[in-house]
Amino acid sequence: MTNTTKPEKVLYTARIHTTGGRDGAAQSDDRHLDVELTPFGVQGDGTNPEQLFAAGWSACFLSAIGLAAGKMKIVLPASRAIDVEVDLCRTGGSFFLQARLNVSLPGLERAVAQSLVDAADQTCPYSKATRGNIDVTINLVGDEFKAV
């Protein structure tokens, strides 16, 4: 699938130099990111690509919720959070990803929280990039929703 949308403006370009694959290191050109990479299930001080992907997606998705809340004039709870689980899977000789986004927006009415999550899913670049490419489940979690 090719993105046919032409940007009006490039807002930011991440530049990462990686060596050694899953058993190497990655560093951004500005040195804000400088991580060792360690394959999952192996002792070591590094992280793995799935953890990095989950961290990026969760940060972006929460920001997209914030944008949606601003447009809808909804005050978000300070304790908002998201837990993202990214699975590296294999069937036969083929590798693939699947993911779950577990969103907590305590104190909001469930319908309001759901509308924010739905809006975020439409605007978050990570959600757009994965849509139709991997199985994704987005859950509202917690039982602390405000009664209607």
Image (tube, grey):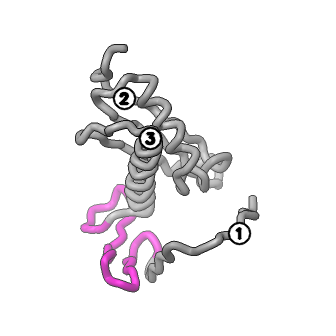
Residue 70 sits in which quadrant? top left
Q: Residue at x 29, y 30 (%)?
A: 106
- Dot 3 corresponds to which residue? 101
Question: Rounded to the nearest whole Å, what is the CA distance between mark 2 and mark 1?
Answer: 36 Å
For marks 3 and 1, give the CA distance. 28 Å
- Provide the residue designation for mark 2: 141
Residue type highlighted by circle 3: Leu
Looking at the picture, tell me which residue is in the foreground, 69 or 50: 69
Q: Residues within 10 Å of mark 3 (few under 14, many from 20)?
A: many
Figure check: 87 above or below 116: below
Which residues fall within the magenta stretch? Answer: 21-46
Which residue is disc 1 drawn over? 6
- Establish if 92 lies above or below 45: above
Q: Secondary structure at mark 1?
A: loop
Closer to the eye: label 2 or 1: 1
Q: Who's the residue at 31% across and 42% down the image?
A: 81
Please tell me whether the stretch drawn in magenta is mainly helix, strand or loop. loop
Q: Residue at x 32, y 22 (%)?
A: 145
Which residue is at a point 45% across and 23% down the rendered structure image?
A: 111
Q: Secondary structure at mark 3?
A: strand
